[in-house]
Amino acid sequence: GAGVSQSPSNKVTEKGKDVELRCDPISGHTALYWYRQSLGQGLEFLIYFQGNSAPDKSGLPSDRFSAERTGGSVSTLTIQRTQQEDSAVYLCASSLAPKETQYFGPGTRLLVL
Amino acid sequence: AQSVTQLGSHVSVSEGALVLLRCNYSSSVPPYLFWYVQYPNQGLQLLLKYTSAATLVKGINGFEAEFKKSETSFHLTKPSAHMSDAAEYFCAVSEGNTGFQKLVFGTGTRLLVSP
């Protein structure tokens, strides 16, 4: 079956612009996660969704970052007023249930100029 | 707080040689431990996981890892490397008593396999 998909695969933006990153989880997976992979910080947890709720958003680096999930499916990660330090690969993962194996998407590579 | 240390950002082996990738963890509660592999321009794929059952865990592609509580280690091994094993490998830890798997990753080890 289809895996986790993310769009766009690559995004180049100018400092100060807003960007939206999309994640389509595996159908039927109730849990969804966002991670960030950057040269300086490695792989970091950003936020976790169970259904449409986000019980843990402790990894969001600043209030410029927000995320939502609708219909228990698609999730969007929004970064407002992008900064150069936001350049990274943003990975989405989903799991059938909160303590089950996480399946990762290919990521969105974001470059802020 | 949990943390993971992976010794060696790069490991080079010859095809057919033993692969050993090191991982040490820190956790105040019994952990769940994972190894993920990442091929270029792809997401992470789970190789194996330890969730407090057998201490020797077998995964996909011939990899296995042994949980050693006394050494706080979870090293990844494979008896004979293949060219296709060349990738980046991440060790991760999650607290076993939380409501979900909040993965904390190591910095990764890039495995290079030469003919």
Image (cartoon, helix red, strand yellow):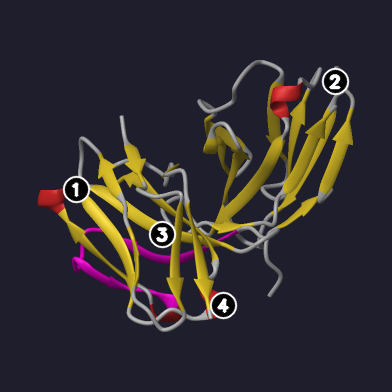
Give the residue type at disc 1: Thr
Marks 2/3 same chain: no
What residue does disc 4 label? B84
Q: Which residue corresponds to the image point at 70% horizontal and 58% vertical from the top-left?
A: B41
Residue A106 percent location from the top left of the image: 69, 57
Q: What is the chain identity of the residue bearing mark 2?
A: A
Marks 4/3 same chain: yes
Give the residue type at disc 2: Lys
Task: Look at the numbered discs 2 and 3 and tell me whether their residues touch, using CB distance below 8 Å.
Answer: no
Q: Which residues are magenta?
A: B44-60
In front here: B96 or A112?
A112
Q: Which residue corresponds to the image point at 49% horizontal and 81% vertical from the top-left?
A: B82
What residue does disc 3 label? B35
In front here: B32 or B68?
B68
Give the residue type at disc 4: Ser
> Mark 1 and mark 4: span between their CA atoms?
29 Å
The C terminus of chain A sits in image quarter: top right
**Element under disc 1:** loop
> Mark 1 and mark 3: span between their CA atoms?
15 Å
Q: Which mark is first along the chain, 4 or 1?
A: 1
Q: Which mark is first along the chain, 3 or 4?
A: 3
